[in-house]
């Protein structure tokens, strides 16, 4: 840190980037003072690790380097190579990402690349042999191989330090310790996953070479990454920007203002990208095609590249768009946040605001009236780790599909933070997505966007997970702002008095165990029964449709599935859509046309089954048994050929059991009742 020699200007002939600088001006005394205040804020925010943690990271990397060297030597010996080859056998560990750029903070993971010789492969040697070696070490925990990722990776913690380990096998029999990763010869005779693995290190090294002042770059990048996390736009997997994207954006601003100090660079960052005309690409250098057979980003030749919303091009060959995940919705959100940052920085420069205002957390749960909630559950923490990773990596597709199916009229804001319900006894995570009508889009009060088919299609994509285990479930539900569960709200979050009271009531509500939900008071159940009995009559007199997504068990008020024709109501007891491969053959009872009595389910009045009440009980996918409110309708279940796709099925004892499939539920009059997601935007 520090701003010494700030006023030094570069020679006019020196140029960084693909264009001339916008300004060669240095800082004023006020800029220097604001930079000191900014650096003080970053230190106070805990963005710098201690010397002890830095030393521990170095020790972990040294141990990891020795492990991979021993691993390669053992493989060399087993394959019958000579003693000299065994002695020379080697693998190197290189770092990239925030650690290589020098902007990592406390608790951050270390992105590492293992480069091995040509005869050591990724599929068997890395993901099997090395995986087993690491699994046996007591320092290694949370070991998670992801061989089918876009960039195959092995994730784990080594002595508490999070490691993301990639592997690249290059065309050398012996890997030297002083390997020059920037040389294009590293890319000869390797496959696409290896190129992508090598590219992380190559891009990081190139960025460092292309910025005028590395220390100013680091301070500015550390600041902007923290800002992005606070404003909810830091997440490559959800369709926003990840670490390398922010590094490239900041590096370009450093090139445009080569003599600026961090406070100036932060302000210029927002000024530049507020006015940037996307999809014009951000590039640190000219795109070169080395003609080694790998595709480079070129919208003139590649039709797919023309669809990119926010191209941010990597500077190392093969140059590619690092932000292809960005969608129209996430670009809109980021543009709004850039404008917010620009406004605050203007006030800071006029001494009307402090740096703390710029880094205020985005009030996501106050910004929309409608949300989608995605609940992810698993049998235990280990299963949740891999299952959550799979679902989270596909959430971006849900955003794209909603944009597609509503022709861009329904805008989505996926929030990259995950939440944990402390009242759930199973392993659980929840994600949220804000929904609103596109600005300028004419729509009438209560306009509905039917995304039932969209969510169903998304569920089928999630079902393709090849490592699915029993207990892995995914639920999608539509919630309104007042129904947002209290566990997502930070301390001091402002809500209306009514909402606060409802959240307290929800928190006090006893949670379901693995088999039975405890009942609420009889008075509450009686009141709900009267409400439901009058619901059909009310429906005929009012043109007001509620969400037809089956509600979450912990929502503040029950929601109903509404039949279009006959006004019948049915509420599923489980939370909307469930993912994963389902029931075995033993659960596919032959009830393809069975008639049964189905209660309008009230989750707030659930209790253990009682034979004296003479009514059927429904059961959710997680085993909770729900008590009916007493009002019944005669319905018929029509199932798909695949028993895994049943919407409802009968248990062996005749109880109605909630399932999560695609088939249709029909009333006794033949009216179609389907429980998927429908959103009413007001």
Image (cartoon, helix red, strand yellow):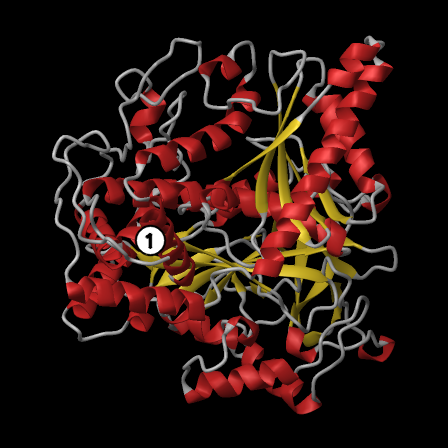
Quadrant in which the N terminus appears = bottom left
Q: Residue at x 24, y 32 (%)?
A: 17
Q: Residue at x 16, y 47 (%)?
A: 275
Q: In the rendered view, would you say 141 is above or below 40?
A: above
Q: Within the image, what quadrant is residue 613 found in? A: bottom right
Say whether residue 48 is visible: yes
Quadrant in which the C terminus appears = bottom left
Q: In the rendered view, would you say 619 is above or below 457?
A: below
**Which of 519/39 is in front?**
39
**Which of 100/282 is in front?**
100
- Circle 1 Cα neighbour tier, 10 Å, few/some/many (<14 / 14–19 / ≥20): many
Give how far across and how far down residue 66 sits, in percent.
74, 34
Q: Residue at x 27, y 35 (%)?
A: 282
Residue projecting furthest to the front = 5
SS at mark 1 in the image: helix
Q: Within the image, what quadrant is residue 419 found in? A: bottom right
Give how far across and how far down residue 338 sits, in percent.
26, 55
> From the viewer's perspective, is 295 left or right of 422?
left
> From the viewer's perspective, is 550 left or right of 515?
left
Give how far across and how far down residue 414 sits, in percent.
43, 54
- Number of marks drawn: 1
Q: In the rendered view, would you say 634 is above or below 315?
A: below
Q: Residue at x 29, y 32 (%)?
A: 284
Say whether residue 576 is visible: no
**Which of 48/287 is in front?**
48
Give how far across and how far down residue 598 sits, in percent.
69, 64
Q: Within the image, what quadrant is residue 555 found in? A: bottom right
Which residue is disc 1 drawn over? 220
**Which of 566/528 is in front?**
528
> From the viewer's perspective, is 91 left or right of 199?
right
């Amino acid at each position: 840190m520090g701003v010494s020699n700030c006023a030094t200007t570069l020679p006019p002939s020196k140029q960084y980037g693909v264009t001339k600088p916008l300004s060669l001006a240095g800082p004023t005394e006020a800029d220097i003072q604001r930079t000191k205040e900014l650096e003080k804020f970053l230190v106070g925010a805990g963005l710098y690790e201690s010397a002890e943690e830095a030393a521990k990271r170095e020790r972990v990397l040294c141990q990891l380097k020795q492990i991979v060297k021993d691993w390669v030597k053992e493989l060399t010996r087993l394959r019958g190579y000579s003693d000299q080859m065994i002695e020379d056998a080697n693998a190197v560990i290189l770092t990239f990402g925030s650690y290589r750029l020098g902007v990592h903070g406390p608790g951050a993971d270390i992105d590492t690349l293992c480069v091995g010789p040509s005869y050591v492969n990724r599929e068997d040697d890395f993901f099997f042999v090395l995986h087993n070696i690491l699994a046996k070490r007591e320092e290694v925990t949370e070991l998670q191989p992801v061989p089918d990722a876009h960039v195959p990776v092995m994730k784990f913690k080594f002595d508490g330090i999070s490691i993301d380990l990639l592997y690249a096998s290059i065309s050398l029999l012996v890997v030297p310790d002083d390997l020059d990763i920037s040389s294009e010869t590293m890319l000869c005779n390797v496959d696409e996953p290896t190129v992508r693995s090598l590219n992380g290190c190559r891009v990081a090294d190139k960025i460092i070479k292309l910025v005028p002042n590395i220390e100013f770059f680091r301070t500015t990048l550390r600041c902007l990454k923290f800002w992005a996390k606070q404003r909810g736009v830091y997440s490559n997997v959800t369709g926003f920007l990840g670490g390398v994207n922010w590094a490239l954006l900041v590096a370009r601003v450093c090139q445009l203002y080569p003599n600026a100090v961090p406070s100036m660079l932060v302000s210029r960052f927002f000024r530049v990208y507020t006015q940037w005309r996307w999809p014009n690409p951000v590039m640190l250098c000219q795109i070169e095609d080395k003609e080694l057979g790998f595709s480079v980003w070129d919208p003139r030749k590649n039709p797919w590249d023309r669809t990119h919303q926010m191209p941010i091009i990597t500077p190392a060959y093969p140059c590619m768009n690092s932000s292809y995940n960005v969608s129209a919705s996430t670009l809109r959100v980021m543009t709004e946040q850039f404008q917010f940052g620009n406004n605050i920085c203007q006030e800071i420069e006029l001494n009307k605001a402090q740096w703390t205002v710029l880094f205020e957390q985005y009030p996501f749960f106050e910004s929309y009236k409608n949300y989608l909630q995605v609940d992810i559950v698993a049998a235990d923490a280990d299963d949740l780790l891999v299952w959550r990773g799979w679902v989270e990596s596909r959430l971006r597709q849900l955003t794209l599909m909603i944009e597609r199916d509503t022709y861009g009229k329904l805008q989505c804001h996926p929030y990259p933070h995950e939440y944990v319900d402390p009242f759930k006894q199973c392993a659980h995570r929840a994600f949220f997505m804000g929904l609103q009508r596109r600005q300028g889009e004419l729509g009438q009060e209560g306009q509905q966007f039917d995304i039932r088919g969209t969510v169903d299609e998304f569920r089928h994509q999630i079902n393709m997970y090849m490592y699915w285990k029993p207990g892995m479930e995914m639920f999608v539900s539509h919630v309104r702002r007042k129904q947002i569960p209290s566990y997502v709200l930070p301390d001091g979050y402002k809500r209306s008095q009514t909402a606060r009271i409802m959240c307290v009531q929800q928190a006090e509500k006893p949670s379901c165990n693995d088999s039975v939900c405890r009942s609420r008071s009889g008075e509450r159940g009686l009141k709900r029964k009267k409400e439901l009995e009058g619901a059909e009559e009310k429906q005929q007199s009012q043109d007001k449709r509620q969400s037809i997504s089956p509600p979450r068990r912990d929502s503040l008020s029950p929601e109903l599935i509404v039949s279009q024709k006959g006004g019948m109501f049915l509420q599923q007891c489980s939370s909307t859509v469930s993912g994963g491969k389902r029931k075995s053959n033993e659960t596919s009872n032959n009830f393809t046309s069975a008639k049964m009595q189905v209660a309008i389910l009230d989750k707030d009045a659930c209790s253990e089954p009682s034979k004296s009440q003479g009514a059927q009980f429904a059961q959710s996918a997680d085993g909770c048994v729900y008590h009916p409110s007493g009002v019944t309708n005669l319905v018929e279940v029509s199932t798909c050929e695949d028993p895994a796709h049943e919407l409802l099925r009968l248990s062996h004892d005749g109880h109605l059991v909630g399932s999560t499939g695609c088939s249709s539920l029909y009333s006794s009059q033949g009216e179609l009742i389907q429980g998927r997601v429908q959103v009413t935007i007001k």
